[in-house]
Amino acid sequence: MRWLTGIAGLLCLSAPCAAAPAATNKVMAGWLEPGYLAELPGHKVKLKLDTGAKTSSIDARNVAVFTRDGKPWVRFELVLKGIRGDTKTITLERPRLRTVLIKEHDGRPGKRSVVKLAFCFSDRLHHAEFTLVDRTEFNYPVLLGRRFLAGVAVIDPQQTYLTQPDCGDTGKTAAKPGIS
């Protein structure tokens, strides 16, 4: 009987032995998923789900800070290349929530404005915080960071396009909006 216990122990060392995951409301997603901005319904873009990034970011150009009613606001153009290869540009104005310092690729810190945007991911309309940055040199216009993903999705890094954005005409709002 002891030898059976020993063999079972060895099997656990050679193969993953984990408890079954608890039930969750999180969606199973790949590292790349489709989605769309609430202001551009139907214009699907590629969302890179990146657990290595803390904060979400979106491709923004001509970012200008101004004051409205004594508070800082940001005017910016979103340049969103669609899944079908077409690009749409939209100018938006949002309250600036804060400014963050992000380490750029060359190692130097860069200042970025943070705004809240609504977007459809899977079957929910989410409201999340995004840094505004020119992502011309990146493959994907939108990056969803772990602050947002932590409460929303479980990522399978070997998969892509496990979800489809379907928020309906009015959009089902996420029970707990993600903040990234």
Image: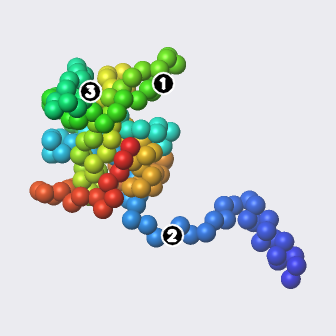
Q: Is residue 55 above or below residue 30?
A: above
Q: Can see residue 19? A: yes
Question: Which residue is at 31% across, 36% downward?
Answer: 97
The image quarter containing residue 141 is top left
10 Å neighbourhood of mark 3: few (<14), some, or many (≥20)? Answer: many
Residue extending farthest right: 2
Which element type, helix, strand or loop, lies under badge 3?
Answer: strand
Q: Position of residue 38 (x, y in %)?
A: 18, 45
Find disc 3 in the rendering and name its residue.
60
Which quarter shows the C terminus? top left
The image quarter containing residue 2 is bottom right
Residues at marks 3 and 1 touching, judged by CB atoms closer than 8 Å? no
Question: Which residue is at 27% across, 33% downward?
Answer: 96
10 Å neighbourhood of mark 1: few (<14), some, or many (≥20)? Answer: few
Find disc 1 in the rendering and name its residue.
103
10 Å neighbourhood of mark 2: few (<14), some, or many (≥20)? Answer: few
Q: Nearer the viewer, residue 64 or 142?
A: 64
Q: Mark 1 vs mark 2: which is more N-terminal?
A: 2
Q: Position of residue 22 (x, y in %)?
A: 51, 69
Looking at numbered disc 3 in the image, what kind of residue is underneath it?
A: Ala
Q: Position of residue 67 (x, y in %)?
A: 19, 26
Question: Which residue is at 42% across, 41% downward?
Answer: 145
Q: CA distance from mark 3 to mark 1?
A: 17 Å
Residue extending farthest front: 70
Q: CA distance from mark 1 to mark 2?
A: 36 Å
Question: Which residue is at 56% across, 69% downward?
Answer: 20
Residue extending farthest bottom: 1
Find disc 2 in the rendering and name its residue.
22
Q: Which-is-in-front pick, marks 1 and 2? A: 1
